[in-house]
């Protein structure tokens, strides 16, 4: 390949030879031909040279200083490039600037609307663009899925309003066959992203018989379990992957649509006496009440303050932290928790003895800081949190006795009436009802 500087040199060489020899143009032409790149087929689009070699399209900027990467427009079409080649094997979401776009076989699809898979999850795309704010039931083939903040919430079981009907969703999917009593666990629109630090061959710090990469995964799983029990949505970054390695390879995680990203690590020091818990946050953060809230709870569980507790990452690393910088770039606040010191035996024991409580306190702190209280969204029907669903939809017009498991309950206009006591007839049977619980008379 030849660059501008080389051309200049060749040009000067040609001029020099031209001074010495009478037939200058012929010599210059010979030199030009001798340095020509072997090209099968060459087309020039805008400022790019395009060559087709062995079915692969190679595109380079003319001055050969940039190898194309990511989404690039060539002659009106956007292609997805990796190392200067269109990645025709790639189908999925690709980031450009602050947004994500849907690419099919290496080509951007501006007309596509629907669900797209990325890292074990389904994301909602409208006219080729990922919509991180979208919350709605979305159809894919013959089924409907509950999309919350742009992603299918596979952990959601409860009711969703669509076209004035309340539909029953179980584990992220609308269940049109379901009939029975359901409880709605819905928390305010909020999704937590969890990343376990290290992994994929990188142990992280090692101490007291433990690998950091194992402990980070252990804690992330516990936090996920607690979050689920509290009705809080989570997206857990693929545990087989190391976010840092993935970003370096160009696979930027999709942070958009999450309300907070918690990256879990364990600290280490050459001084075995170093102890305690701390957070690294991005240098641009103006507040850190969430991180303080979590730390305060960990201190209450017996940990102590490490360094200054909440520390801006650039105090230690000038350029900040790679994963954190990417999360912030996508508009998602990010905290890197250094849970405790793996290099300190007391800290490791503290973790092993308190791991579940630590997970609980992390979630309690988030519920507290983000105000994630259960929403009362049922206007007009305040009678409780259990609803009678028939063929996937709440029967607001239904009044009668409904069974669940071994028990019978009195439902009035779609919800269990826990305040009712008396006698009611339902399905030709007579029931004695006490505080909403029915028994056959
Ligand atoms: Zn680490």
Image: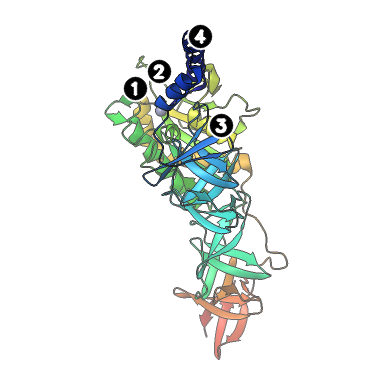
Q: Which mark is residue 291?
A: 3
What residue is shown with label 1?
Answer: 343
Query: CB atoms at circles 1 and 3 under 8 Å apart?
Result: no
Mark 4 residue element: helix
Tell me, for residue 19, which label it has, or none: 4
The quadrant where residue 258 appears:
top right
Left or right position of 277 against 370:
left
User: CA gap, disc 4 to disc 2?
Assistant: 74 Å
Rate crowding at label 1 as few (under 14), some (14 to 19) or many (20 or more) other CA atoms within 10 Å.
many
Q: Which residue is mark 2?
A: 274
Which label's residue is closer to the chain start, 3 or 2? 2
**Residue in the picture at 35% in, 42% down:** 240
Q: Quadrant of residue 112?
A: bottom right
Q: Position of residue 387 (x, y in %)?
A: 59, 70
Figure check: 387 above or below 246 = below
Going from the N terminus, do you reach mark 4 or mark 2 first? Answer: 4
- Residue in the picture at 43% in, 23% down: 30
Q: Residues within 10 Å of mark 2 (few under 14, many from 20)?
A: some
User: Cα distance, mark 1 to mark 3?
Assistant: 23 Å
**As drawn, 21 above or below 227:** above
């Amino acid at each position: 390949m030849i660059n501008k500087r080389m051309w200049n040199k060749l040009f000067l060489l040609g001029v020099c030879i031209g001074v010495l020899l009478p037939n200058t143009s012929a010599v210059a032409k010979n030199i030009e031909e001798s340095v020509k790149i072997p090209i099968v087929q060459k087309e020039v689009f805008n400022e790019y040279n395009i060559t087709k070699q062995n079915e692969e399209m190679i595109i380079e900027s003319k001055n050969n200083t940039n190898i194309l990467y990511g989404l690039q427009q060539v002659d009106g079409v956007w292609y997805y490039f990796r190392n200067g080649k269109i990645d025709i094997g790639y189908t999925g979401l690709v980031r450009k600037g602050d947004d994500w776009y849907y690419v099919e076989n290496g080509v951007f699809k501006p007309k596509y609307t629907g669900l797209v898979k990325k890292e074990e999850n389904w994301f909602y795309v409208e006219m080729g663009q990922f919509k991180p704010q979208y919350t709605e039931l979305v159809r894919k083939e013959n089924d409907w899925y509950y999309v919350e903040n742009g992603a299918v919430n596979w952990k959601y079981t409860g009711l969703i309003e669509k076209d004035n009907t309340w539909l029953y969703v179980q584990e992220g999917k609308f269940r049109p066959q379901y009939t029975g009593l359901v409880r709605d666990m819905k928390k305010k629109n909020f999704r937590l992203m969890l990343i376990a630090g290290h992994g994929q061959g990188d142990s992280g710090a090692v101490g007291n018989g433990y690998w950091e990469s194992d402990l980070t995964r252990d804690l992330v799983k516990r936090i996920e379990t607690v979050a689920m029990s509290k009705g809080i949505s989570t997206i857990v970054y693929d545990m087989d992957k190391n976010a840092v390695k993935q970003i370096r390879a160009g696979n930027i995680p999709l942070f958009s649509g999450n309300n907070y990203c918690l990256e879990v690590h364990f600290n280490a020091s050459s001084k075995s006496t170093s102890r305690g818990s701390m957070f690294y946050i991005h240098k641009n953060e103006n507040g850190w009440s969430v991180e303080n809230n979590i730390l305060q709870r960990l201190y209450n569980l017996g940990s102590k303050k490490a360094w200054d507790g909440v520390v801006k990452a650039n105090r230690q690393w000038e350029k900040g932290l790679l994963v954190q910088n990417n999360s912030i770039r996508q508009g998602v606040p990010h905290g890197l928790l250094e849970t405790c010191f793996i290099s300190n035996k007391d800290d490791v024991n503290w973790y092993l003895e308190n791991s579940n409580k630590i997970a609980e306190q992390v979630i309690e702190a988030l519920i507290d800081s983000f105000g994630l209280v259960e929403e009362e969204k049922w206007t007009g029907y305040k009678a409780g949190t259990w609803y009678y669903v028939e063929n996937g939809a709440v029967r607001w017009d239904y009044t009668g006795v409904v069974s669940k498991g071994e028990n019978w309950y009195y439902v009035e206009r779609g919800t269990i009436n826990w305040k009712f006591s008396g006698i009611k007839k339902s399905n030709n049977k007579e029931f004695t009802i006490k505080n909403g619980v029915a028994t056959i008379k």
